[in-house]
Image: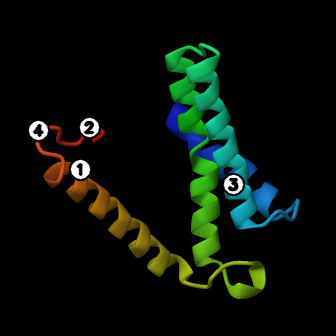
Amino acid sequence: MAILFTFALGTSVGNPVAETFGFGFITTGLIFGGIIAAVAACYYFLNLDGVWAFWLAYIFTRPPGASLGDFLAQPLEYGGLGFGTVTTSLIFFGCIVAIVVYMTFLCPGIGLTLC
């Protein structure tokens, strides 16, 4: 349910904020990044339950990810960089591979946990 809710939130909230309300892709990503930062602040400073903090942060990761993807993929006339969906997907794939390689091989003894 959380994964379905997360993906639905990315398209049903992130895109209208960027397009319908006219904030643009970058501003929308920053807005939702701020929401994630607020959740982290509530966890660290206001004793928000760790389970709630995790799931709220997890759910709110989709809109900034969708905004970044749209920014890279959409044509210039729509406020994007015009890379297209294939190139954008390859960029994201490359970033994911780089992170996994970094965390696997450059953090000895830790593996895929945070360095």
To which residue does mark 4 refer?
A: 109
Q: Label 1 crowding class (10 Å Cα cut-off): few <14, some 14-19, many 20+? A: some
Kind of residue sitting beneath label 4:
Gly
Is residue 62 shown left or right of residue 15?
left
In percent of the image, x 53 and y 32: which residue is there?
2
To which residue does mark 1 refer?
A: 103
- Location of residue 6 in the rendering, given as x and y in whole percent from the top left corner: 58, 41
* Label 2 with label 4: CB-CB less than 8 Å: no
To which residue does mark 3 refer?
A: 30
* Residue 87 appearing in the image: yes
Q: Earlier in the sequence, mark 2 or mark 1?
A: 1
Could you give the CA–CA distance between mark 1 and mark 4, rounded to whole angstroms? 10 Å
Q: Residue furthest right?
A: 21
Q: Label 3 crowding class (10 Å Cα cut-off): few <14, some 14-19, many 20+? A: some
Q: Toward the viewer: 94 or 113? A: 113
Q: Is residue 69 above or below residue 106?
A: below
Tag on residue 89?
A: none
- Location of residue 27 in the rendering, given as x and y in whole percent from the top left corner: 75, 60
Kind of residue sitting beneath label 2:
Thr
Of helix, strand and loop, which one carries label 1?
helix
To which residue does mark 2 refer?
A: 113
Kind of residue sitting beneath label 3:
Leu
Q: Label 4 crowding class (10 Å Cα cut-off): few <14, some 14-19, many 20+? A: few
Could you give the CA–CA distance between mark 2 and mark 4, rounded to whole angstroms? 10 Å
- The colouring scheme, among rainbow, by chain, secondary structure or one colour, is rainbow
Q: Quadrant of residue 102?
A: bottom left
Is residue 112 shown left or right of residue 16?
left
Kind of residue sitting beneath label 1:
Met
